[in-house]
Image (cartoon, grey):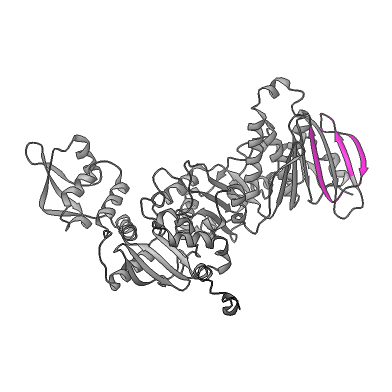
Amino acid sequence: MLSSIYTLPEEVVNLIAAGEVIDSVAAVVRELVENSLDAGATRIVVAVWTQHWRIRVADNGCGMKLTDLQQAATAHSTSKIRNCDDLWKITSLGFRGEALHSLTQLAHLEIMSRPALTAEGWHVCYDAGGQVSEATTVAIAPGTVVTVSDLFGNLPNYREGLPAIAQQMKAVQSTIQQIALCHPHVTWQVWQDDREWFTISAGKTSQHLLPQILRQVHINDLQELTVEVPNPDTLSPQVQSDNSTTRAFIKLILGLPDRCHRHRPDWIRVAVNGRRVKLPEIEQTVLTATARTLPRDRYPICFLHLQVAPNHINWNRHPAKSEIYLHHLDYWQEKVAQAIEQALRVHPETIPESLHNSRVSKLIKAAEATSGYNYNRQIQDTEVESHNSSPPTYILKAVAQVNNTYIVAEHPGGLWLVEQHIAHERVLYEQLVDNWQLVTLEPSVILNNLSPAQRSQLERIGIEIEPFGEQMWAIRNIPAMLQTRDDCADALLELSLGGDLQTAQVAVACRSAIRNGTELSLEEMQTLLNQWQRTRNPRTCPHGRPIYLSLEESALSRFFRRHWVIGKSHGI
């Protein structure tokens, strides 16, 4: 049988600028499980024996025949590319052909493998040069088992300089979790020192895996969205590509801002074509797009997976392929921002009842609690509205007002309590962002005893200020929304206390919004609900507070036990 693994030509090797670097236990695990995924594995078992510096990765992939095993550990041997052109259309996780060869120089390497359609497998051991030192037949299930023993045994000083075992195992766990998110169809079982350490069950999408990694996050706390976007090449008629007909995809898993967030920006994960990568520009786009939906000093939970044409990526930048050159970066930033905006919208349709079942008891507690803010994590999710869709169909009907603070709104799946001040604040804030307008003030407002920093701050946001006497200044223009307010001077003093234009817009919106305690007619409540449903980020106010509490019909039905049989409920 002919081998499918070949040694790369010298001209291809010379074009590969970054070779594999095996510098840790996690790096070994990464390289071996990526080979398993390239082999089509759907189940991967990783075992690490820390005291013996031994790693074993077993999979149910396509396996290798003997001719491939004989070639697999030699330098620059791979089945994934053949020539120079292939370097610009990489579709696999590995392609350089150096990982196994590097392992033979740092440890003892042995591989057992059996293709699915053959009756027997082979057990092959390799010497330090990657040549086969022993090959015997073995009875195993279809797939491959790679064992690396005595890692860095020939480099004792290097081994002693590595981090503590606990830290290295944390890196192993993080590596597997990141890869698993990119390949949700794979089941993972991880062992440490002959004890099962953790497992990750396969799911339909990455949304089903993330709660297994972040235990405090529930699947209903996440919004999943897949957006098909044009290939950037198709946007320019002057540029022709062999991938010009390819569609690209943005797959987004976003923690809903009224339910989950982080103290640090440590859970913004970006992947491209099946691999976690570092793209600071895209990560900053996520932070910017969610900035005024989260509480102060809180950050989003986001997993973003870009599936783009292979010729738009240069993987040949970093040994771990974690840093890449992505073409048309500004285009992807724009599309990611649009996808996040789309994910945060509210869709008219309600969720299937099955999604509510696991949280019914908490929903009822929310209904009985005196303060809704402690329980808004229970708001049930809805499907997102298309970014380019027609104007929304209003699904909320104003029914009543509670304590002149909360609007009771009915919708097909139950009822919502909407806090009127912060709902209006969200409406006004987005209006200000879209149309920040300063108008001439007649007569001028006079402010006293402004510090140089306060005067500079007012000028920074576009407000004209002139001396009007000793320690007095005249304000010549003002945000249009504050023009008719009686507390105009107080508002200007508030704006002078610091912050950028966005902060000023938040302050203006907050001061201009309907106050709690204000009585509203049904018509006024309905108008506010309609305006609020049109906003881009209806879940939270610009300060990050949740705006509404949802009580679904399914939860109410269970609480009042409407499913009981009347006879049985009376003890008959």
Q: Say which quadrant the C terminus sits in.
A: bottom right
Would residue 395 appear left or right of 458 to someone viewing this image?
Answer: right
Q: Nearer the viewer, residue 67 or 181?
A: 181
On the image, the x and y values in percent for residue 541 come to 36, 55
Q: Nearer the viewer, residue 572 or 473?
A: 572
Say if 81 sits above or below 232 in the image.
Answer: above
Give the x, y percent position of residue 504: 28, 48
Say which quarter of the image contains residue 419: bottom left
- The mark tally for this picture is 0
Which residue extends farthest top? 157
Q: Which residues are magenta?
A: 122-149
Residue 189 in the image: x percent, y percent?
73, 46
Asked if residue 492 shows in the view, the reply is: yes
Residue, x 68% and y 53% (percent of image)?
201
Q: Residue at x 57, y 56 (%)?
A: 219
Residue 379: tell me if it is visible. no
Q: Is 336 in the magenta?
A: no
Residue at x 32% of width, y 48% of height:
502
Which residue appears at 42% of the width and 58% of the height? 369
Question: Which quarter of the figure has residue 467?
Answer: top left
Residue 473 as seen in the image, left or right of residue 332: left
Q: Say if the magenta span includes residue 123.
A: yes
Q: Position of residue 564 (x, y in %)?
A: 57, 75
Picture quadrant where residue 168 is located: top right
